[in-house]
Amino acid sequence: MKRKDPATKNQKFLAVFIALTMLLSACMIYFTGNSDKNSNNDISSTENVEEGLIIPFSQIPGKQVHHKFNSIADGLNMTPQGAISATYVDLQKAAGTPFEQIVGNTSMLNWLYGANVTKVYNTNYVNGSNEFELHLIPEQKIFAPIGAIPYKNYYLLARTNSTYDIWNVAGSPVILGSHQSARNVIDILEGNATATTEYDALLSQANPEGSIYQRVITKTNSTDIPADQVYMDFRKLGDGNYTQTSLYLNPEPEFTEKIETLKANSTERGVIYNVTTSGNITKIVMTSDFGSLLNEAQMLAQ
């Protein structure tokens, strides 16, 4: 199982967005139409072009996202069914810790919007068609979009001049994704679609709020994990040590044996194990300094 992937590494939306956002002329939008009767795939007309213009969310008409966003559970509550993995990172908690090096340079996220991003969430699907990201921007401002399309009283904000299918929806958090994936999230917010429940069993035994990094993943042909599903989080303790909590749904017998083997002499490596089992879920809580904890996680994943 890959444990060091940055939350936004190789995300196709960000990759294209980085390349284009600062090269295109941002502009104030003249929004036309206020209902889905006028909604189509044509970007509404624009005027008052001004390069690099940053506008507050209050200048964007229509409804905006207002959803709790303190953990991966909150992100999953906005996620369509079928996600094979999801990741949540609190960038403020990661700042100044060794975990900041794993997350990577977050200044590019701030550059994308012209404002600081403090929390990020992303999803993956087997076919890749429904992937999207959520970004928390406390400053409530954003580079003005190229244009907009209304959808159920929200506005999908075009981030490119129709060359790429990349859109934002303003709010807390901001949605970043394709035209269809943004609409899918809005459908959940409006109660017209059901959010994923695939990870409810694992999350019922987790305490995700307050973590630096959280991830869930389902076993597929393209994932290599020792259980049907895995949940993992990292958090920093008051004494400077770190804790990694991992939950495994239906772990493989060989992996269960590995846990017991590593636990038996873990104190020699400076790692404290706490292993419990409830039904078909095995929970491991490991505590140590950051380097020892990452080394132990790698040993478990081998």
Image: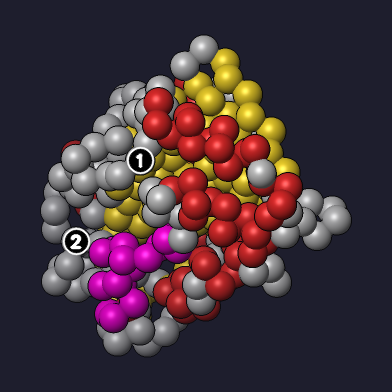
- Which amino acid type is marked by label 1? Ile
The one nearer the camera, 85 or 288, is: 288
Q: Nearer the viewer, mark 2 or mark 1?
A: 1
Colour scheme in the image?
Answer: secondary structure
Q: Which mark is residue 190?
A: none
Q: Image check: 8 left or right of 287?
A: left
Residue 168 position within the rendered picture, expressed as x and y whole percent measured from the top left: 35, 58
Query: Residue, x 57% and y 16% (percent of image)?
Result: 278
For the record, the magenta segment spans: 5-20
Residue 127 higher or lower than 295, as above or below: above
Which residue lies at the image location 63% right of the left edge and 55% below the top edge? Answer: 293
Magenta region includes residue 19:
yes
- The reply to whether dot 2 and dot 1 touch (C-beta < 8 Å) is no
Residue 48 part of the magenta segment: no
Q: Name the residue located 40 percent from the left edge and 44 percent from the top edge.
A: 86
The image shows a total of numbered marks equal to: 2
For badge 2, the amino acid type reads: Asp
Does 167 appear above or below 279? Answer: below
Name the element at disc 1.
loop
Is residue 229 something that shows in the picture? no
Residue visible at 30% across and 87% down in the picture = 23
Q: Is residue 106 left or right of residue 179?
A: right
Q: Residue 22: where, in percent of width, then height?
A: 35, 84
Q: Which mark is residue 165?
A: 2
Task: Determine crowd level at label 2: few under 14, some 14-19, many 20+ residues with C-alpha closer than 10 A.
Answer: some
**Callout 1 environment at 10 Å: few (<14), some (14 to 19), or many (20+)?**
some
Please indicate, yes or no, whether residue 84 appears anywhere in the rendered image: yes
Looking at this view, name the residue that lies furthest to the top: 279
Which sits earlier in the primary sequence, circle 2 or circle 1?
Answer: 2
**What is the x, y in percent for residue 106?**
52, 73
Question: Which residue carries the number 1 mark?
Answer: 225
> Quick one: 134 or 268, which is closer to the camera?
268
